Image (tube, rainbow, N blue to C red):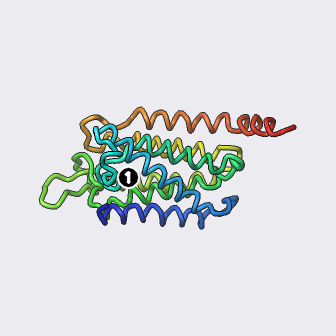
Amino acid sequence: MEFTLLWAALSAVVLAWVGLRLWPERVPEHGFDRLLGAAVAGLVVGRLVAMATQGINPLASPGDILIVRGGVHTGAAALAFALVLWLGNRKDPGALDAMAPAVLLGLAGWHGGCLWRGACLGTASDLPWAWALDGSTVTRHPVEIYAALALALGAWSVSRLGWRPFLRAGSALAIASLVRLITEPLRPSLTGGPLAWYLAGAVVGLTLIITGPRLTRDDASDLRP
């Protein structure tokens, strides 16, 4: 793993830890460990899926799993992260709501980590705050900074919400998905990016917001003798 990518990952980890300290209400015991474990699982799954889609056999080339800069499948990584986090807190669904702001702040740290990697810029722009790559005269949108700021604002907004079941978790998922969806056109891409994954994430997040109370009631009724 290149060091600049490591610093970006550490930025995400540090800001997630800061988020748990800023908004500690109802955070479960070992909340940071739970987030970190889910993030590692998501990274590994996302890397394996990316290798498979690139025609690389992970069993034949296990060392390539560590070359994260070779690509990580965003959708698979996010799905694995959410699944592991949910499984680890399925007996306490409220823990997901408690950790939701910290998750968004950690994502903001990852996007802001573009400053370490020199990978903040997107499509060409003449806006006053656009800047150019070294050796280039073409100024570009600092799209990753846009995303980082939007996610940080989203984290603060989610921390202000009430404690209706899955309101915070659903809002965080919807915000993260919509931020990526809105900023994706500003990223250079031959395929347009995984827009379907972002749309699906937004729909699932909104669904959780709407149906969360009923889901928790159903879970409670299942636990009754």
Residue 177, horizontal then vertical, whole percent = 47, 42
Q: Which residue is mark 1?
A: 146
Residue 112, horizontal then vertical, whole percent = 38, 59
Residue 41's place in the image compared with 2, above or below, is above
**What residue is rendered at 38% in x and 52% in y?**
146
The C terminus sits in image quarter:
top right
Residue 81, horizontal then vertical, whole percent = 51, 48
In this figure, what is the number of numbered marks?
1
**What residue is rendered at 47% in x and 63% in y?**
13
**What residue is rendered at 49% in x and 64% in y?**
15
Would you call the spot at circle 1 few (<14 residues within 10 Å), some (14-19), or many (20 or more)? Answer: some
Residue 73's place in the image compared with 37, above or below, is above
Q: Looking at this rendering, what residue extends furthest in the front direction? A: 60
Q: Secondary structure at mark 1?
A: helix
**Towards the viewer: 57 or 117:** 57
Residue 79's place in the image compared with 10, above or below, is above
Amino acid at circle 1: Tyr
**Towards the viewer: 25 or 218:** 218
Residue 23, horizontal then vertical, whole percent = 62, 62
Query: Within the image, what quadrant is residue 222 found in?
Result: top right
**What residue is rendered at 56% in x and 48% in y?**
84
The N terminus sits in image quarter:
bottom left
Left or right, residue 171 beside residue 125? right
Q: Looking at this rendering, what residue extends furthest in the right direction? A: 225
**Towards the viewer: 76 or 52:** 52
